[in-house]
Image (spheres, grey):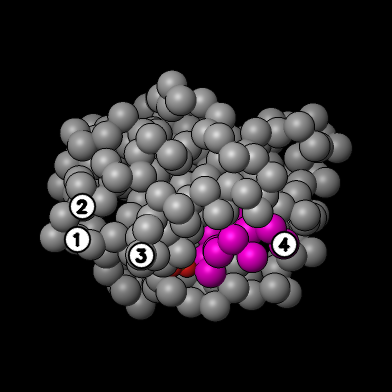
Amino acid sequence: MDESIKVAPSLLAADFGRLSEEVAQVEPHVDFLHLDLMDGHFVPNLTFGMPVVAAMRRATSLFLDCHLMVTNPVSLFEPLQAAGADLVSCHIEVLPDPTRAAAEARRLGLGFGLVLNPATPFAAVAPFAELADMILVMTVDPGFGGQEFISAVLPKVEQARNWVDSHGLDADVEVDGGITAATAGMTRQAGANAFVAGSAIFRAEDPVAAVHQIRAAVGRNERQNPDHR
Ligand code: DX5
Ligand code: ZN
């Protein structure tokens, strides 16, 4: 496995009263920023929308990975692109055939990711994996930060990695939910290369040290691409 290791903080766990400072603190040490958009329908929670994405675009040059936990993700692509998003990832549970969504993301110049809930089998995304820049295997049920990692998902991380490698794809295999240094290590062994952590970074006493702990656990100490956009 020679794919690059990427570590991303999830904004959801940051202090919403000081978002730009929170991001600035970790920016030199992380590879991208993960933004969780929720609609109170696909998941029983609301987070933030375009004004916050646009504010983050002004605050940082980090690549903005938007995880859309919404029933109608495609309707958000244009406003997200206008707000400065770089990639949109959509749940396969709401887009059983994501072909048109992927084409729409490409048309707008956005990266495209496919996401699976813990209960969704890898087979649901396999036929469409070639459309994706990122396959996000959720390691908790989406909707809230601070939940416990579900280790039963590890074999699915392995399936995603095997599929990507055996089909010569260069999609990232991302994990999200309950990621700490310990669980990042487990998912790395299963083949993940992109690690999203909310609480483990922003709720740590020293967020920068927390990023380095995750990097150490997945076997890489430095950020891969200082030129991150
Ligand atoms: C959960 C979100 C996650 C969340 C992760 O629905 O998709 O990105 O912010 O938070 P932690 O790392 O605290 O589990
Ligand atoms: Zn997320």
Q: Is residue 57 above or below residue 203?
A: above
- The residue that mark 4 highlights is 186
> Marks 1/4: CA distance?
30 Å
* Residue at position x 86%, y 37% in the image: 166
- The residue that mark 3 highlights is 205
Q: Can residue 14 be seen?
A: yes
| Label 3: element kind | loop
| Residue type, numbered disc 4 | Met
Looking at the image, is mark 4 or mark 2 earlier in the sequence? Answer: 2
Looking at the image, is mark 3 or mark 1 earlier in the sequence? Answer: 1
Which of the 4 quarters of the picture holds residue 170?
top right
Looking at the image, is mark 1 or mark 4 earlier in the sequence? Answer: 1
| Residue type, numbered disc 1 | Phe
Q: Can residue 81 be seen?
A: no
- Front residue of 98/81: it is 81
| Quadrant of the rendering where the C terminus is positioned | top left
Q: Characterize the local packing of mark 4: few (<14), some (14-19) or many (20 or more) Cα atoms within 10 angstroms.
A: some
For marks 3 and 2, give the one nearer the viewer: 3
* Residue at position x 55%, y 35% in the image: 222
